[in-house]
Amino acid sequence: MNDMSSHAQMSIASQIADWIVRTAEKPLPADVVNMCERLLLDVSGLCLAARNTDYVQATLTAAEPGSCTALGHAQRYDMYSAALINGTAAHGEDFDDTFEGGPVHSSAVVMPAVLAACERFGRSGQDALLGCAVGIELLCRLSLVAPRAIHKAGFHPTAVIGTLAAAAGVGAALGLNREQLTSTLGIAGSMSSGIIEYLKDGSWTKRMHAGWAAQSGIRAALLGKGGFMGPVFVLEGEHGFFHGFAPSKTPDFSKLLDGLGDQWLLTTIAFKQYACGTMTQPYVDCAIELSRRGVKADDVVSMVCEVGEGTVHRLWEKLEDKRNPPTSYAAKFSSPYCVSVGFLKNAAGLAEFSEEMVRDPEILALAQKVSYVVDPDNPYPTRYTGHIRATLKDGTVHEVRRENMRGGAHDPLPPEEFEAKFVGNVLYGGFDKSVAGRLKTASTELFKQPDLSSYTGLRTA
């Protein structure tokens, strides 16, 4: 026996554990179930789209064989490797869902962890649904506790918060009790990692952050299940998670706890329409609108974007570097490139971020004309807005604004656009529409299965 229980009564982690245990005792709301099914479909398509990429192929070399599914691959892997592969593939093109307020990517972390664990241990689809819902909700809520501060400290919120969320999701799916869940969160705090130095040279580490958090979450949950003790004050403690990863801001845990169990924030998750950084999305829409108005690139003298201060260090600076991204991956986090390619191609999908495309002289020439000014009243990160003021050679000024990110709760993607994205990803990965049909069926069937160790609906070979 240990003496953790009396101390855990007051901790944030123990309150999260209480919520998980209570949530497991009743059916999930219909809108939560529906969102989890849509997220599974989105993740499935993304994994297939990325399966032949160089970074996924490199990840496979670090994987071990086993019994779990890596989407889009015939080989089966151990659960840690499956979580790593699926998480890396789902997040690798930055085309996965996002949460306005974070920003964080949730399903690319939580679903690979929960599905691998449930497949390995023969848990039911309902167990997986519970784990996905709990983990995704927790990731969204934790991202609101100290907004902007994790990025400011040089860490990737999806990565560091994601480990906690994946651990909670796996713990819920495996039926851990209150004390085990509390320790699981404490353990996950020491496994959290993920720096954002990739922004400098366009290297690949962000791509693996979701997969790394997923496999770490499984490990934390199994340690907690086995009785390993983690710090109960992991989140709010003097040497805790937010002290380490977000030291510039006092955490506001009311954002995490208020309405927990009554209101599900995950139902507001946004689905990206473009394969690039979250906050660039509405700016791409503005660029496409300018192009459709008949504005010509040769006539443009300047494009000035009003932006939120919290986005500058990741998407705008150093400006000269952002105008000339060193790799196709770096281009995804370059607002000048994203605005330019959106304007010239009327798109910003997977094809617009190839190594060939980011060397296109016309795109790079226009990117040199794109700059920014900080808008002190910009609502980021609560809401993601877009703005471009284009000045032409004859002195004409064209201005476009977007008050919301298209694909989010305020402006959701129509069902046909959501499905078109999914099917496009499947085709991009080299499969045909019959595979897309099977995966669409699986996205609703999976959560009804009695034993996921024998379920083959997500396998493509």
Image: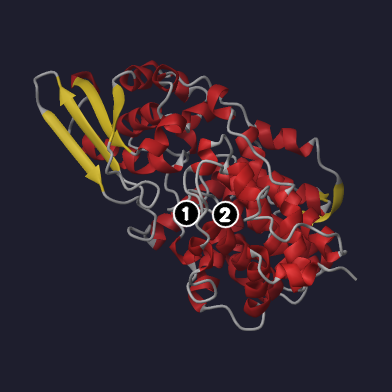
Q: Give the quadrant of residue 302.
A: top left
Are there few (<14), some (14-19), or many (20+) residues within 10 Å of tag 1?
A: many
Residue 61 seen: yes
Horizontal side of 96 relative to 209 (left or right) equals left
Residue that mark 2 sits on = 106
Residue that mark 1 sits on = 99
Pinpoint residue 386: horizontal percent, then vertical percent. 30, 42
Q: Are marks 1 and 2 in contact (CB under 8 Å)?
A: yes
Pinpoint residue 181: horizontal percent, then vertical percent. 74, 66
Are there few (<14), some (14-19), or many (20+) residues within 10 Å of tag 2?
A: many
- Looking at the image, which residue is at 54% across and 28% down? 199
Mark closest to the chain's N terminus, 1 or 2: 1
Amino acid marked by disc 1: Phe
Horizontal side of 39 relative to 385 (left or right) equals right
Pinpoint residue 61: horizontal percent, then vertical percent. 80, 35
Mark 1, secondary structure of its residue: loop
Vertical comparison of 284 with 162: above or below: above
Camera-nearest residue between 401 and 52: 401
Camera-nearest residue between 381 and 334: 381
- Looking at the image, which residue is at 52% across and 78% down? 29
